[in-house]
Amino acid sequence: MSLLATALTVVAIVTQDQTALRAAPRESAVQQTVLWQGDSLEIRATKGDYLQVYDHRRERAGYIRASQVRQQALQPENAPELLAIVRFLRDTPGAEALGIGYAAAYLKAAPADAINAEVFDALGTFAERLAKRATVRQGKAPDTSVGAHLEVAAAYGVRMVSFEREEQVQICYNGDAFRRVLALPASDQQKALAALALTRHDCVAPALTPTERLAVDHWRAEVLDRVETTRLPEVLKNRLHLRRAGVWASLAWQRARRSEAGAGPVTAAGKRAVDELAAINRSELAETDAATYSDAAIRVGASRWAAEPAGAVLAATAPGSLGIATSPGQPGETCVHLVDSRHDARHSLLTRCTYGIVWTASAAAHPQGTALALAVQPLDGWREMWVFRQEATGWKVDVVPPATVQPTLGYVEFAGWVPGSGQMLTAREAKVDGRYKLSFELLNPATLEIDRWADKPASLSAFQRWQAPAWKARTVSIR
């Protein structure tokens, strides 16, 4: 039974972790159970320095030192005092379970017409911070308090969801309190914080079907768009733009997967993602948001070709020129045909099929007709580059990934051909082991080896001379 539903008018809220509930009012008495901050107890009597209490969650009676709890009356006149404590605990890391206990006490004590979005904003903040603590603690020294605090939160009806991501269990708050913030009269800042909490990328379940994921991302986009940003601080505006950029980049990829969506919605989503990233006020970007900015840029970079019209995918008519044509393969597949002025899709130079999204507008052929680069996006937030090249035995295609790790976030893109050498310029950005890396490279297509690289294009002479103007105009790697 949730403690919110009990009819108690006075409760004892435990304020210290690992507090003993004993069988008698003395230190040497048998320990019945261990209590944690935020636990709420029914007070039945006073015995010297001890209170005789009943724990409804564990269905245990016993005695507890009065100094280890705070006795709190749950009457309307006590509601302002409870709310003041909630406000204090909201900004006290480590006191999330205690904050949830006091928020529950306030909701019990306050008249219905006095309850507004503030307490739900605090309750959601407590729950989200507790979920983050539980996720971060994995793999570190055992900390029994985190698990105990999660149990305390669950007793008040605060629900968490968990799933495996990147070889660890991700724990997230289900967001019920934040949904109430959006439904109640609230300040723009409260609504913005609630929207950000409800739309986190790392709290989208990875096991969703494509249809379910599309619905979730449409909902996330709607939630973010309902927030009025005019009166928000610049830091909070930036965070909303970053989240919107990531969500719309994901929508662009998902819409492209659904052929019935058409090119218009795909292009609209791609342009929206680019526009949101461009709206960032760099001078007001908080230092703590640097990783979030890189995350959003990679998501937009992976799907940026969605913002471009598909264009012509057939080969040009000039002798030796290369192009691509696409056709449906097995259900869900797209087959890419390498063609030129003498070879059409039915008699292509080379054909390869993929379940990824083929961004046909990205096709860039070598001026001498000996190679072609193409962007293919197999996953949301992960875009690879296909390199078609001619060898003595015929045509071959290799896949260049953003990083040689399990796909998480990343993209690699063609940036230009180096005349006379057969080399190509590439830009690569990826998240590897929790860190973000951006590099500009001189790549040998024959071996796929990186001859030289730099963290800035200006530091690589080949980039200064041979970078493609079209790449420089569209890329998000230079920002």
Image (cartoon, rainbow, N blue to C red):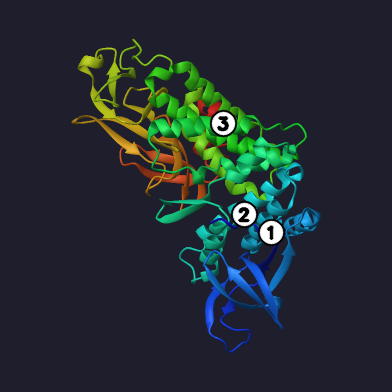
* Residue placed under numbered mark 3 in the picture: 221
Type of amino acid under label 1:
Tyr
Q: Which mark is residue 463?
A: none
Q: Mark 1 packing: few (<14 Cα in 10 Å), some, or many (20+)? A: many
Residue 94 horizontal side relative to residue 377, left or right:
right
Image position of 45 with respect to 381: above or below:
below
Cα–Cα gap, marks 3 and 1:
33 Å
Residue at x-position 38% and y-position 20%? 259
Which residue is denoted by mark 1 in the rendering?
102
In this rendering, which labeled residue sits more in front, label 3 or label 1? 1
Q: Residue at x 75, y 31 (%)?
A: 230
Residue lying farthest top? Answer: 317
- Residue 110 in picture, x, y percent from top left: 74, 50
Find residue 4 and name its label.
2
Tag in front: 3 or 2 = 2
What crowding class fits label 3: few (fewer than 14 Cα within 10 Å), some (14-19), or many (20 or more)? many
Q: Secondary structure at mark 3?
A: helix
- Out of 148 and 413, give the one closest to the viewer: 148
Helix, strand or loop at disc 1?
helix
Task: Tell me if mark 2 has few (under 14), some (14-19) or many (20+) residues whose alpha carbon lies within 10 angstroms of its own.
Answer: some
